[in-house]
Amino acid sequence: MTFKNPIFCAIDTTDVTRAQMLAHALAGSVGGLKLGLEYFNACGHEGYRAVAESGAPIFLDLKLHDIPNTVAGGIRAVLPLKPAIVNVHASGGKAMMQAAAKAASEAGSERPLVIGVTVLTSLDQHDLAATGIASTPRDQVRRLAALAAESGLDGVVCGSHEIEVLRQDLGAGFKLIVPGIRPAGSAINDQKRVMTPQEALALGADILVIGRPITEANDPLAAARGISTSLAA
């Protein structure tokens, strides 16, 4: 599955009306939309469908992490919504990721991409050490990405500074979805590993997840179009 525009806009709200408004405004100017836990927990399947009416591909960012059978059930539960992408935490292990991939395949030709979350972009080496992981973020991302590929996943979510090494490790066909993308001059907020859209795309990212620089702009559509134009330059 490929997308004509690499930008997926993260819609982080619990307001269905606002989410629907943003979705319809942005649908023709971004490659897709990302809906996460905040929105899905508050608005559920009906809220998802309200956004999906825009026609934009949707990355359902639930970051499932549980025993294999439960994660497989979670994947099956959202297949009727026909998301373009779903994800699980790669740290859940090989059996869990294999179960997720197998469950997604039950959708046949409408199978979503199944992506593994490696290391959250809000975490640095100090944060990892506090959880008992002695590796650097880069080494941990490489380890989990390799395990995701071995488990049959389509790609991973990774930080911008791991794009180049993962592309070298896992080849051109493995999808790299990159959050923590900030156009030049934007606030980094709670992200610790960030990069501009141009830099990330040049290194080999497939999808750039951009939220607040678009959704909190005075004119979200103009912001999205400006980023898209900058990538085409």
Image (cartoon, grey):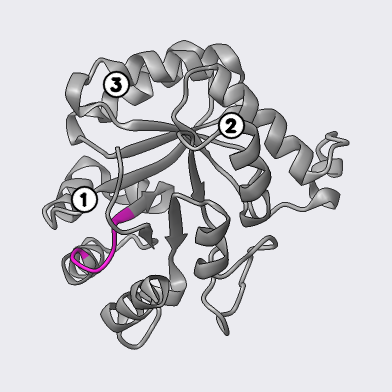
Q: What is the count of numbered marks?
A: 3
Find residue 76 and name its label.
Answer: 3
Q: Secondary structure at mark 3?
A: helix
Residue under the image location 27 percent in, 30 percent down: 78
Query: Which element type, helix, strand or loop, lies under badge 2?
Result: helix
Whole-percent x, y for residue 97 in the image: 51, 20
N-terminal label among 3 and 1 = 1
The magenta span reads 27-33
Residue type at numbered disc 3: Arg
User: Image quadrant for the C terminus?
Assistant: bottom left
Residue at position x 40%, y 78% from top? 216
Query: Residue at point 57% right, 66% down?
Result: 199
Q: Nearer the viewer, mark 1 or mark 2?
A: 2
Q: Is residue 222 above or below residue 16?
A: below
Whole-angstrom CA distance, mark 3 to mark 1, is: 18 Å
Screen quadrant of the N terminus: top left
